[in-house]
Amino acid sequence: MTEHTKTDGLPEVEPIPQVLEKARPRNERMAADKIECNACPVLCQIGEGRVGACDRYANSGGTLVRVDPVVMLRRTVEDAGAKLVRFAGRPALPAGLAEAAGADGDASGLDPAGAEAGVADWDGDLLRANEVFVTGIGSSTTYPDYKPAPFIVASQADGVDMVTVVTEGIFSYCSLKVKIDTDRYLGPEQANVRCRGEVVGHVTTAEYGSQMLSLGGVHHLTGGSKKEGRVTVEMMQALGNRQPVELTIDGGAQLLVQAGRPPVVNGVEEQRMRVGCGSATIGIFAKQFYGRVDEVVVVDDHITGVLTEHQAGRCLDMRPSGLRIRGRKSTPGRYFQVANPGTGWGGTDIADPLSIVEGWDPKLAWPGQRVLMVSTTGEHAAWYELDEALAPREAEMPEAVRRIVERIGENCEPSLTSVLFLGGAGGSLRAGVTENPVLLTRSIKQSLVNVTCGGAPAYVWPGGGITVMVDVMRMPENAFGTVPTPAIVAPIEFTMRADDFAALGGHVEEVRTLGQALRSGAWHDEGAPVARRWLAADPANPWPIGHAPMLG
């Protein structure tokens, strides 16, 4: 006899997974007053009133909370306005917890009126909503990557419905590209760069007037010893947060670098980025030298220029001086390898400029010839006149020539250290946006989705995945954190039209209005931030909403 059931003839029902916001603890013997943080793979067990190993999450009354406030940008922030407001319905941090965590927030600074009203400093005006942007800084994360991003915020830009997906990314595949404006010799290409004795990167190619370093990266974060990984991630966090870091280069210089500050090379703060190589300097100032000097040598580690041989001098029909320079002649008036790299004249190792002079051709030179030797920054300069034996004698530099030397210095850019964060966001981060992650990648490459980091414009590299690069000076301060795996935590936001968000399979069920996000924060409770902080948007940055990405 055949047994019949109630589902006969009906399609098979697919099982619906039970989606837990928080996994069951790994250890059933965990103390009752502890909770397990599952915001990253470390899974810290955190006691009441204490923070986890990353200092980002804490146990507040048995609830896991993100201790830093989520940072929101506004185009204008009134000085008298509340800058830190607790979300409605969120637990207050116990006294001292924020300080213990080293968080960029002060629990005592919470605005109680704002906490009760929720959006007391924003009245829901859609016109003003065009001025508000939720960043990933302090937003919390999506680990273990099957959850929607903590903030998926609906807003408007010029009357168009927009959605911004906001999260804190955990980046193992990431590095810093550091540009150091200097002529000084920092070290050979591929040389190791060390921090506190650990190798944390290497010297890469020099650029025009700058030395480049590549720091961090997955090889140093996870491919070496535990200490190497720990030092590397701490170095990256400090540089990303605009703090100074001491570095040494094998076979090279000692450095003190800080984003937005002049580099300090071997204890000396750099002042000027060279105006150009020796050849360029000759060309730029040739007409100004004409008639005031018979020969000019611009000493440079890259290309040392000689005016009367150079095409610029020939165009001015200058008389050949007969000066012979050491080094390898590249083209007329342009010499390579006149000296070794160093911290002396023009990025060479010389202190006496005459050491690169072989002599003067007696058939061409003449007594009384006036010769200027100068570096590419104008920081070094000397004036010579040939005696009867055609030997150079140093003399006082004429005032007219000195003014040209000063103009060389005036045209040099100030030396700076620039730090760019480079991270690969092509993996699990995308699951916080859509159930079909490749559609997010394709939408970015089709210029439908803008990518920002803390509201700062991010350059998206060509090729596969979502590899972004951003100048840390355009991000809010203290935008970077760490987890002990080790990896860097960085904010990232994806902004697009609401219909494009739906088309790429976005988590539309988790979209909240800007008013809701301002009132109560993230959509989830476990590990959510308890407060928001207002910051003024950097006026140098384009407003993140309503822009296409910067694609490579």
Image: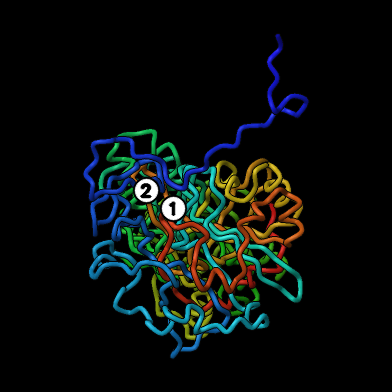
Q: In the rendered view, would you say 19 is above or below 352? A: above
Percent x, y of residue 481: 39, 56
Residue 210 picture location, percent across and down: 50, 58
Residue 280 vs residue 156, the one in the foreground: 156
Q: Seen from this angle, which residue lies furthest front?
A: 1
Q: Residue at x 60, y 37 (%)?
A: 16
- How far from the left and from the top, in percent, is residue 507? 64, 52
* Residue farthest along the bottom direction in this orientation: 80
Residue 302 seen in this snapshot = yes
Q: Secondary structure at mark 1?
A: strand
Q: Which mark is residue 483?
A: 2
Image: 409 above or below 184: below
Q: Nearer the viewer, residue 205 or 355?
A: 205
Q: Amino acid at mark 1?
A: Val
Instruction: Give the amino acid type for the residue marked by disc 2 in the picture.
Output: Val
Give the residue at mark 1. 489
Q: Residue at x 34, y 56 (%)?
A: 63
Give the position of the N terminus as an image quadrant: top right
Depth check: 537 or 281 in front?
537
User: Compared to 283, does 442 lie above or below?
Assistant: above
